[in-house]
Amino acid sequence: DGGITQSPKYLFRKEGQNVTLSCEQNLNHDAMYWYRQDPGQGLRLIYYSQIVNDFQKGDIAEGYSVSREKKESFPLTVTSAQKNPTAFYLCASSIGTGTQIAKNIQYFGAGTRLSVL
Amino acid sequence: AQKITQTQPGMFVQEKEAVTLDCTYDTSDPSYGLFWYKQPSSGEMIFLIYQGSYDQQNATEGRYSLNFQKARKSANLVISASQLGDSAMYFCAMRYNYGGSQGNLIFGKGTKLSVKP
């Protein structure tokens, strides 16, 4: 089955600790995205990557880092600099980002819920 | 700046009736895409329907239709014959079609739909 796999489903972070959220896709999509969702809110973009070995900051990148060494994988690290990391994190992918792709739908994983101990 | 507004925090509908979820947007770009996603309590974002700014006809996908009024900058989702499984959060989103952030989505804060038996 093609899709996006996020792991773990639940994650706990101790103060001062870095934690990494995994996102893997087998849809052969070029573009991948990380979003943060707080209770009662919509999604906000953290980072996005249009192609391997390239990524860009989104609206709330401070305290987060990413890498894109493989097309299939886009891990997100929540660093100790992120003072309020408790949230639901969603990873998404799309065929690309160009406007020649009429719909260019973003497909999402099941999410990781991060809490602070 | 681009913006998405969903003015209904919560809605109730009787099973088998139709319901309209409101979405207004603000952009100065002539080219953009509008999306609706469903988020059940499990957390995954499920793509429902897409409308391009140049599409002449309103989009339809099964029981979902999009009432697109370009001059009013509204893109309301209509769900016909509501089912208990339709109970979820619904998010409206707009895609940038220009600039360095093309392909990225901005989301509204969502509407929680509850279907009553």
Image: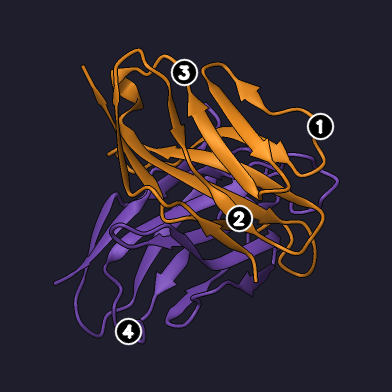
Chain colours: A purple, B orange
Taking the image as shown, residue B113 lies to the left or right of residue B49, namely: left
Q: Name which residue lies at 37% across and 18% down.
A: B82
Relative image position of residue B88 (x, y in whole percent): 33, 35
The label shown at residue B25 is 2
Labels 2 and 3 positioned on one and the same chain: yes
Residue B70 appearing in the image: yes
Q: Name which residue lies at 79% across and 68% down.
A: B99
The label shown at residue B80 is 3
- Depth check, mark 3 against mark 4: the one in front is 3
Q: Chain of mark 1?
A: B
Q: Which residue type does callout 1 highlight? A: Gln
At mark 3, the secondary structure is loop
- Density class for disc 2 (Cα within 10 Å; few <14, some 14-19, many ≥20) is some
Q: Chain of mark 2?
A: B
Relative image position of residue B93 (x, y in whole percent): 56, 50
Q: Nearer the viewer, residue A9 or A44?
A: A44
Q: Which residue is mark 1?
A: B56
Q: CA distance from mark 2 to mark 3?
A: 23 Å
Asked if B107 appears above or below A20 in the picture, the reply is: above
Q: Which residue type does callout 3 highlight? A: Ser
Q: CA distance from mark 3 to mark 4?
A: 47 Å
The label shown at residue A80 is 4
Number of numbered discs present? 4
Mark 2 and mark 1 in contact? Answer it, CB < 8 Å. no
Relative image position of residue B4 (x, y in whole percent): 55, 57
Q: Which residue type does callout 4 highlight? A: Ser
Q: Name which residue lies at 60% across and 48% down.
A: A93
**Which of the 4 image quadrants contains residue B49?**
top right
The label shown at residue B7 is none
**Which of the 4 image quadrants contains residue A32?**
bottom right
- Density class for disc 1 (Cα within 10 Å; few <14, some 14-19, many ≥20) is few
Q: Name which residue lies at 58% across and 63% down.
A: B3
